[in-house]
Image: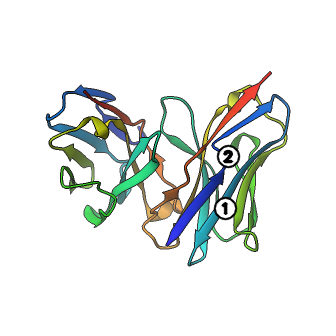
């Protein structure tokens, strides 16, 4: 069985500051890991994914995440926050061959202030 | 491609009424998922289909909920009778083996049961 825990339901940063959104996973098999972003009144969009290739994954909009098996973590980072990054971010896990069934974390709402 | 199309975009109904939500997946995708999003529970997987066959409906809250996928291009989620606690945003998503576990989400249906 898989599960995901996102630490911090709300994160607030200043424009230009580092963004760090935390995600820890639990999986009995090698996981696939994802970060999705949801803007207000929209569906989820894929930011990046880890599927057992490189442990440092680069996504859209300057985001990246590093898979750390020893820490069972997949934290999302961005060196410099932009106002347009304000949204809700979801970490998700699935199992290879699991019909793409994703289990989502509770989400982290990112606020960016001037 | 038009993406995953959901209808209606908004639905307001009275308690006890039947509600039907509709989804058209991306052409060529063979997996379809229904998720429910609420403030309290976050994103919950209700049911998913593979090649039009329900694979896992363990997330369906109770017998009032039912889902069908009569063909590869259409799915419905029905609630009968509806209750105020069913108020949520319902998302449909689709994927295929070629998408490397990535889900494509629709814009959701905002359901309000009064």
Q: Secondary structure at mark 2?
A: loop
* Furthest residue toward top: A114
x and y, in percent, of residue A68 in the image: 75, 68
Q: Is residue A86 above or below residue A66?
A: above
* Residue B97 falls left or right of residue B21: right
**Residue marked by disc 2:** A8
Measure how far apart labels 1 and 2 are at the Cα level.
12 Å
- Residue B47 in view, yes or no: yes
Labels 1, 2: one chain: yes
- Looking at the image, which residue is at 20% across and 44% down? B79
* Furthest residue toward bottom: A29
Looking at the rendering, which quadrant does residue A82 occupy?
top right
Q: Which chain does tag 2 point to?
A: A
Instruction: Categorize mark 2 by other alpha carbons within 10 Å: few (<14), some (14-19), many (20+).
Output: some
Looking at the rendering, which quadrant does residue B32 occupy?
bottom left
Q: Is residue A103 above or below residue A36?
A: below
């Amino acid at each position: 069985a898989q599960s995901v825990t996102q630490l911090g339901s709300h994160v607030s940063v200043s424009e230009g500051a580092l963004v760090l959104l935390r995600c820890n996973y639990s999986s009995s098999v090698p996981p696939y890991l994802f970060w999705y972003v949801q803007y207000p009144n929209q569906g989820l969009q894929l930011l990046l994914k880890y599927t057992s290739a490189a442990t440092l994954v680069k996504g859209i909009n300057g985001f990246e995440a590093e898979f750390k098996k020893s820490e069972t973590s997949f934290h999302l980072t961005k060196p410099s926050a932009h106002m347009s990054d304000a949204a809700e971010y979801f970490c998700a896990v699935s199992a290879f061959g699991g019909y793409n069934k994703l289990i989502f974390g509770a989400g982290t709402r990112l606020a960016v202030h001037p | 491609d038009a993406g995953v199309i959901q209808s209606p975009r908004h639905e307001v109904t009275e308690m006890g009424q039947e509600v039907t939500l509709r989804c058209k997946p991306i052409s060529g995708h063979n997996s379809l998922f229904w998720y429910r999003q609420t403030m309290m529970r976050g994103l919950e997987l209700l049911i998913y289909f593979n090649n039009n066959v329900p694979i896992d409906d363990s997330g369906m809250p109770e017998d009032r909920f039912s889902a069908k996928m009569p063909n590869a291009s259409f799915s419905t989620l029905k609630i009968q009778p509806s209750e105020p606690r069913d108020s949520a945003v319902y998302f449909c998503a689709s994927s295929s083996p070629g998408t490397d576990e990535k889900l494509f989400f629709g814009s959701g249906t905002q359901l309000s049961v009064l």
